[in-house]
Image (cartoon, rainbow, N blue to C red):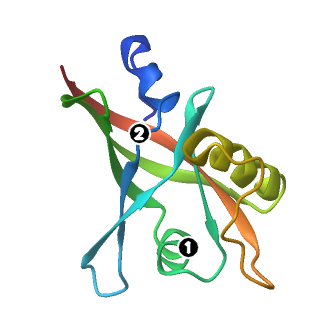
Amino acid sequence: MAATIPDQYKDLFQKKAFCNLATLMPDGRPQVSPVWCDLDGSTIRINSAKGRVKDKNMRRNKKVALSIFDPDNPYRHLAVQGEVVEITEQGADAHIDALAKKYLGKDKYPFRQPGEVRVIYKIRPDHVSHVG
């Protein structure tokens, strides 16, 4: 069941605020990674490289959780439980460049590795809570 990001918290996705993304390892242990994120309509988008731990985890188990803290007020935050509803390589290179512009002020993502395949994960919020 989809939930909505409250309008008064959408600004967090415009700021240089990192998301802490929680996925599940094959044995059920949680794995948390700080990631760049943005909001695309009603879905949260993150970007990673194919073959990384979080990539493998999200392909195997679509259930995820994330939190995002306001860099201007860490007592203001949003927590989301949701599901990965789309995994695509389409537009992923442009997306990581846009995130690099947002987070680093760089036009191109400077940490590309040879042969790296970028992937966008679209997360549908199913449960949203917030403070602040």
* Residue placed furthest toward the top: 8
Q: Would you say the residues marked 1 and 2 are in contact, meaning their CB atoms lie under 8 Å apart?
A: no
Residue drawn 65% across the image and 73% down it? 49
Percent position (x, y) of residue 45? 59, 45
Q: Is residue 44 visible?
A: no
Q: Is residue 117 above or below residue 10?
A: below
The C terminus, quarter of image? top left
Q: Is residue 108 above or below residue 33?
A: above
Q: Which mark is residue 113?
A: none
Looking at the picture, tell me which residue is in the foreground, 88 or 13.
Answer: 13
Apparent side of residue 8 relative to residue 56 in the rendered image (left or right): left
Give the residue type that dot 2 points to: Ala
Q: Name the residue tied to disc 1.
A: 55
* Residue that label 2 marks: 17
Which quadrant does the N terminus fall into? top left
Q: Residue at x 38, y 20 (%)?
A: 9
**Picture residue at 44% right of the left edge, 38% below the top:** 125
Residue located at (43% from left, 12% from top): 7
Q: Can you give x and y, in whole percent of width and height, for residue 41 in the image?
A: 63, 26
Determine whether the residue tagged by mark 1 lies in a helix, strand or loop: helix
